[in-house]
Image: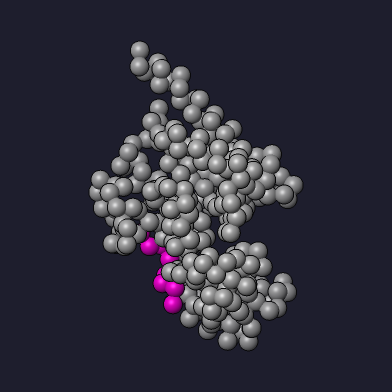
């Protein structure tokens, strides 16, 4: 029987949005986890700086995965050993899965020149211009700019043919691209699964068997949700779970409400069930 429950969550379009305040339901769900000592691990396309700011807000010190699976950050003294491939970083160690930021940006620029495509790359924007692009305060935009592995950009011509040409050219150079609202994120990380699998292996090695609950809200989350024990899909307002997701995640649970309220429901309903399922076994072992 697993001794611990671990919650891994995406925060894009769920949990706390940039520039917003916690909803009462979110506060209650976060308190529910904290009171039971259940670790909350963030797995996001956001930068390390953005996630660390959220860690500070939530008053948590746990590992996290940044920039679309590009890096796994391990806080100081979280592990009783130094993880393989980990290098020292401010506040702990990091395991890299992607290529450095300047390499990704240089390759993106080269591909766009070859295809004669006009893009607006965040590397070329000031903090104030990024704030305007995203509709966030300048303080948030500054954290967005502190990317280490991936680049955000907007393309002038969003026709299907143009995007197809761009994505194929990027793939030939070892980059992949996904949409983030009106912007695109380009990365050299093959998928988001390797970082999650590495975290899961480290957790087992350090602390033993555990139940890992995963919360995501898009098809892009499927690659890593396949490797958690309890996958949960937060309703995103698009009429349930896509068939492609169900084929890959046949045991996935779906929340009724969407977005931040759906995230809170997932914690109470599905994490609560995971806790309840452990209690009878714990009582029987204590006899």
Q: Residue at x 43, y 69 (%)?
A: 148
Q: Residue at x 48, y 42 (%)?
A: 7
Is residue 166 shown above or below 205? below
According to the image, what is the colour scheme of the structure? one colour
Residue lying farthest top?
287
Where does the magenta region start and end? 95-103
Q: Residue at x 51, y 78 (%)?
A: 123
Query: Residue 273, image x and y in percent?
Result: 54, 29
The C terminus: image quadrant: top left
Q: Is residue 13 magenta?
A: no
Query: Residue 136, image x and y in percent?
Result: 60, 66
Q: Quadrant of residue 257?
A: top right
Is residue 216 visible to us here? no
Is residue 74 shown above or below 180? above
**Is residue 286 rendered to the left or right of residue 249?**
left
Q: Nearer the viewer, residue 269 or 28?
A: 28
Q: Nearer the viewer, residue 38 or 195?
A: 38
């Amino acid at each position: 029987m697993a001794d611990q429950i671990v919650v891994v969550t995406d925060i894009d379009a769920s949990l706390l949005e940039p520039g917003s305040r916690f909803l009462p339901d979110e506060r209650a769900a976060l308190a529910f986890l904290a009171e039971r000592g259940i670790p909350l691990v963030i797995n996001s396309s956001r930068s390390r700086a953005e996630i660390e700011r959220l860690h500070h807000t939530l008053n948590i010190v746990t590992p996290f995965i940044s920039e679309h699976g590009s890096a796994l950050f391990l806080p100081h003294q979280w592990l009783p050993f130094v993880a393989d491939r980990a290098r020292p970083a401010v506040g702990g160690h990091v395991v890299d899965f992607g290529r450095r930021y300047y390499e990704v940006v240089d390759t993106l620029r080269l591909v766009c020149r070859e295809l004669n495509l006009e893009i607006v790359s965040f590397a070329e924007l000031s903090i104030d211009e990024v704030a305007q692009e995203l509709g966030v305060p300048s303080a948030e935009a500054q954290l967005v700019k502190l990317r280490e592995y991936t680049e955000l950009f907007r393309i002038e011509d969003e026709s299907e043919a143009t995007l197809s040409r761009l994505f194929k050219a990027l793939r030939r150079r070892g980059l992949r691209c996904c949409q983030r609202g009106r912007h695109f994120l380009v990365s050299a990380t093959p998928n988001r699964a390797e970082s999650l699998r590495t975290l899961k292996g480290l957790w087992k090695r350090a602390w033993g068997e555990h139940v890992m609950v995963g919360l995501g809200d898009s098809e892009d989350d499927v690659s890593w949700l396949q490797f958690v024990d309890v996958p949960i899909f937060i309703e995103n307002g698009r009429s349930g779970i896509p068939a492609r997701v169900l084929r890959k995640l046949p045991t996935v649970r779906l929340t009724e409400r969407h977005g931040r309220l759906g995230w809170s429901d997932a914690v109470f309903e599905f994490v609560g069930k995971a806790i309840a399922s452990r209690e009878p076994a714990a009582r029987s072992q204590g006899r």
